[in-house]
């Protein structure tokens, strides 16, 4: 990041070398409710690329055979414009579940918004809905 001066001319490496940021949210009880949060671009950055979205630190196995739990990335007008991670029934405690498991989760990895909305979808189960985990998102940010 930044500029390197060579022959009195500034060379902008910000496009070649993005700023990678991992955003970690508070644990979410997917069986009991929903969560909404947001991600803001670092100062001076205007474009982003989603590298990963997932959940980790799963402390309760997911029970969601009726409605699957989800982590969505989007805008206020389109909750899953950029990504929708679908967390399957029986995702086990202590696992990590991310875009390696749900390879279709990222819908549009490039965006020009400086703020992204993260929302979750509550799970439903024919028995008792369950699933507690910590959502995270990894984004490469670019200056232009």
Image: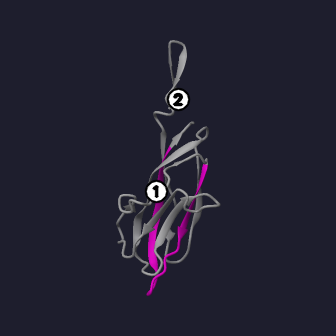
Quadrant that contains the C terminus? top right
Residues shaded magenta: 115-140
Q: Give neighbour class at mark 2: few <14, some 14-19, many 20+ (Cα, 10 Å).
A: few
Residue at figure coordinates x 50%, y 68% from the top left: 28
Mark 2 → mark 1, Cα distance in angstroms: 29 Å
Q: Is residue 27 visible?
A: no
| Number of numbered discs | 2
Observer-nearest residue: 76 or 29? 76
Give the labeled residue for mark 2: 2
- Mark seen at residue 106: 1
Observer-nearest residue: 34 or 77? 77
Determine the secondary structure under disc 2: loop
Residue 66 x/y as whole percent: 46, 81
Residue 53 x/y as whole percent: 45, 57
Observer-nearest residue: 61 or 119? 119
Q: Main secondary structure of the magenta part?
A: strand
């Amino acid at each position: 990041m930044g500029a390197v001066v060579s022959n009195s001319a500034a060379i902008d490496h910000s496009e070649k070398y993005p700023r990678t940021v991992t955003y970690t949210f508070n644990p979410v009880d997917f069986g009991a409710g929903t969560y909404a949060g947001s991600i803001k671009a670092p100062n001076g950055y205007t474009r982003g690329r989603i590298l990963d979205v997932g959940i980790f630190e799963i402390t309760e196995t997911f029970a969601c055979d009726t409605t699957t739990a989800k982590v969505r990335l989007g805008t206020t007008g389109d909750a899953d414009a950029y990504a929708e991670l679908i967390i399957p029934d029986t995702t086990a405690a202590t696992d990590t579940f991310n875009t390696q498991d749900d390879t279709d989760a990222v819908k549009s990895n490039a965006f020009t918004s400086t703020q992204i909305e993260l929302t979750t979808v509550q799970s439903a189960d024919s028995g008792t809905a369950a699933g507690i985990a910590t959502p995270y998102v990894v984004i490469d940010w670019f200056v232009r």
